Image: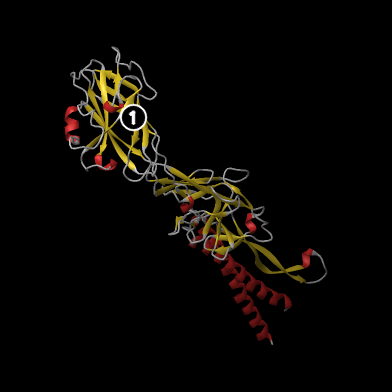
Amino acid sequence: MASINEGLFAGRAGIQSHGAAISVLSDNIANANTVGFKSSRAEFVDLLAGNISGSGSATAVGSGSSVANVTQIFTQGSFEYTGRGLDLAIDGNGFFIVEDPSGARFYSRAGNFSIDADGNLLNQNGNNVMGFPVNGTGGLELLNINDISTTSQPTSNVKITGNLDASTALGTGDPYAGNLGVHAATPTFDFVQQDAAYSTFLTVYDSLGKDHTLNIFFFQSGTPNQWEVGVYVDAAEVGGTPGEAYRLGGMSTADASASPATGGSFIEFLGDGKRASVGSPDFTLNNIPWSNGSNSSNINMTFDPYTQFSTASNISSLIQDGSGSGNVVSFNVETDGTLFATLDNGESANVGQIALATFGNPEALRRTGESLFSESQESGQPVIGTAQSGKFGAIESGAIELSTSDIASDFIKLITLQRGFQGSSRIISNIDDLLNEIINLA
């Protein structure tokens, strides 16, 4: 009778263990679309009730099975490329480090991050993503885009490359070269454009980061192979009447006899279409009196390489060394975890470096929900570092790591567990029949 009762207990244990294992598989399947999810495995062990007689293993009687452990399988998940700068995936070892409002730290493989109204980098649960800010103390800190430096740089140098059409008829130069101040005779841009053989424009920046447009006009001077360059701004930018053209004076280093009062800004060419000589710079726009309270600007103008061939006038490149203050428009993360903010002025600013953590035994991490893990005594303490250093993997920007749950494999396992569950329940019903038979014998 004792051995039959042990069979009942074995059946009950089988139902419990297989039910627990089915729950683990169900959890895997339910999280098939959870970012950064790592599938789990139920590990069975046998139960020993005792010995029928003696102490040999041949007489040992089992008492069913039990789930001894549920192991997280930390295999690399595949990537889904989203193109979003704050979607990050770890290719290799490591966990992102996040901190909740109470200061408790957790670890995650889910890298679908965002920025809150205060500029903090957060995970999908609103926890702060930890890292090493560019101006930080060297320890783990919050990453905040409001801490970036967006100081402006006034334009000091302009370099232009291109071609002027050698077949242009001889002209008379810039007829407004003497108008170096705002006065009633200052022409409009339409008038300047009518007299110029070619023109272009360029954005420059003052000491406050304010942008200004330089309108650059090329006039045939009346001398073969010689051109006069006139640089104009809207008069309103220097305290004049809006819409009027204000000519900025310049001193030609190639022609030292030219007077700043006449804006001596000439470039000359040889018979082969190349520059006769290139100044360093060709001329300087001195003491530009911006009216917005910024410091006056001195801008060196260089036209090199520049040619004069019998083809349409054109500009190949416009380069200036200034920058204005900008607003953040997008983000990009390098493979080493360095977070850059792209500004609307075309510049980028370094926010800091996202931190990663590894563990001696990651499978022993304690699962806390919301795609988070916490350290345990068995996992060991975290080793904190950055991507692509030591044993840490790389960070892939514009991608998320998908769940490692394999639905096809899980359903196959589910079939075998279902059979085990059914077999264990059948044991109980069959032993119940045997017990009824014994009772009937009485």
Horizontally, residue 150 falls left or right of residue 217, namely right
| Residue 435 in the image, given as x and y percentages of width and height | 66, 81
Q: Is residue 382 above or below residue 174?
A: below
| Residue 27 in the image, given as x and y percentages of width and height | 52, 63
Residue occupying the far bottom of the picture: 442
**Amino acid type of the residue that numbered disc 1 sits on in the rendered structure:** Ser
| Residue 88 in the image, given as x and y percentages of width and height | 48, 50
The residue lying toward the viewer, choosing from 256 and 97, is 256
Task: Tell me if residue 75 can be seen.
Answer: no
Residue 299: quarter of image: top left
> Which residue position is annotated with label 1?
317
Q: Secondary structure at mark 1?
A: strand
Residue occupying the far top of the picture: 271
The residue lying toward the viewer, choosing from 236 and 354, is 236
The residue lying toward the viewer, choosing from 93 and 129, is 129
| Residue 409 in the image, given as x and y percentages of width and height | 52, 55
Q: Is residue 5 above or below residue 72?
A: below
